[in-house]
Amino acid sequence: MLRSMNPFSRLCHLPSELRQPAVRDLAWVLVSPPLLQDAPWPQRHPLAGSHWARAPERLEQWLRELDHDGQPLLDWLARSSTRRLGVYYERLWQFALTQAPGIELVAANLAIRGEGRTLGELDIVLRDDSGTYHLELAIKLYLGPADSVEEPPRGADPFTWLGPGCHDRLGRKLTHLSEHQLPMASREQAQMALRALGVDGVDSRLWLAGYLFYPWGRHVESPRGGHGEHLRGLWVHRQDWPTLRQQAGPGVWQLLPRPSWLAPARVEVNDVWSEGDLRLWLAELDPQARAQLLVRLVPGVDGDWHEAQRVFLVSDLWPNVAGNDID
């Protein structure tokens, strides 16, 4: 059941094997599992109706060829000046959908206007052999609740899972998707916009990907409906960082910049931080800085260093501090 949601789950090794960062991110977008198995709205992998879904080895071949010459992808991404992670995620999907055999990308970011204003937009409208679909795409990173060991473990409630900047909650995002974004296609104004594209009706679906970060040293349940194979990490308060690091496995730690939050990190040996680099960075980091994503890297047989673990380092006052979420 878990595997049926993602036709490319057997290709989960690809993001770590490919070399070009944008191609690795593209592979991660296409093969990673969703956050949820059961969502308040039906989910559908955007490439479920592609010919690639029936022959995943063809997708692997395409990605490996792109890894040798990634210029078409880089040219596509260069058309947008926005560097927001959510927009980057959507652009990667759009590129794949324009290339996927058996898929017609009818529209992307279709603005729905009415009442003298923009009411919203439809992320993706596509057509395949099984029908025409409106898809809402989202990439999210959420941190679980920080219960003490004496309290009953929480986490099942999606509203207890916070974005790194504390402005977003998994429960709030699911509510917005199911009550506003996904029903948008059924509104009269959206129907008019779709008919102008030759589309009489669509089936609205969701695809929500990302990572869930569990509090270090505490037992927290996964959110209700969580996918059994969802990607995960840890989060830790600054005061507990030395202990976590001491107990972690071998390797080196360094900051993972926000544009690189998708695929597992792969770092060339000359770019790996030294112990001095890490100490200097920590010494200069504001005690109330927004959440910082760190990765533990271990050497690979190919000569590069590969991600073995990712951890959000947060202020000791988190979540009672302001910050920025990924959108």
Image (cartoon, rainbow, N blue to C red):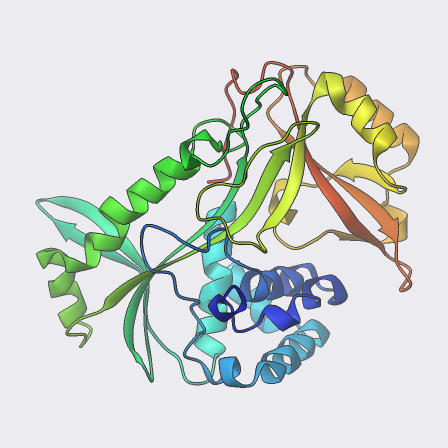
- Tell me which corner region of the image, top left, top right, bottom left or bottom right, holds residue 198: bottom left
For the point 58% across and 61% down, which residue is it? Answer: 32
For the point 14% across and 71% down, which residue is it? Answer: 195
Q: Nearer the viewer, residue 29 or 69?
A: 29
Q: Horizontal placement of 204 versus 33: left or right? A: left
Residue 245 appears anywhere in the view: yes
- Tell me which corner region of the image, top left, top right, bottom left or bottom right, holds residue 217: top right
**Relative to residue 192, is residue 277 depicted above or below?**
above
- Tell me which corner region of the image, top left, top right, bottom left or bottom right, holds residue 283: top right
For the point 49% across and 70% down, which residue is it? Answer: 4
Q: Position of residue 169 (x, y in %)?
A: 42, 34
Q: Horizontal placement of 44 versus 244: left or right? A: left
Q: Nearer the viewer, residue 186 or 226?
A: 226
**Relative to residue 11, is residue 226 depicted above or below?**
above
For the point 12% across and 55% down, which residue is it? Answer: 187
Q: Position of residue 79 (x, y in %)?
A: 48, 60
Residue 80 appears anywhere in the view: no
Q: Horizontal placement of 120 versus 25: left or right? A: left
Q: Nearer the viewer, residue 33 or 259?
A: 33
Q: Position of residue 305 (x, y in %)?
A: 85, 53
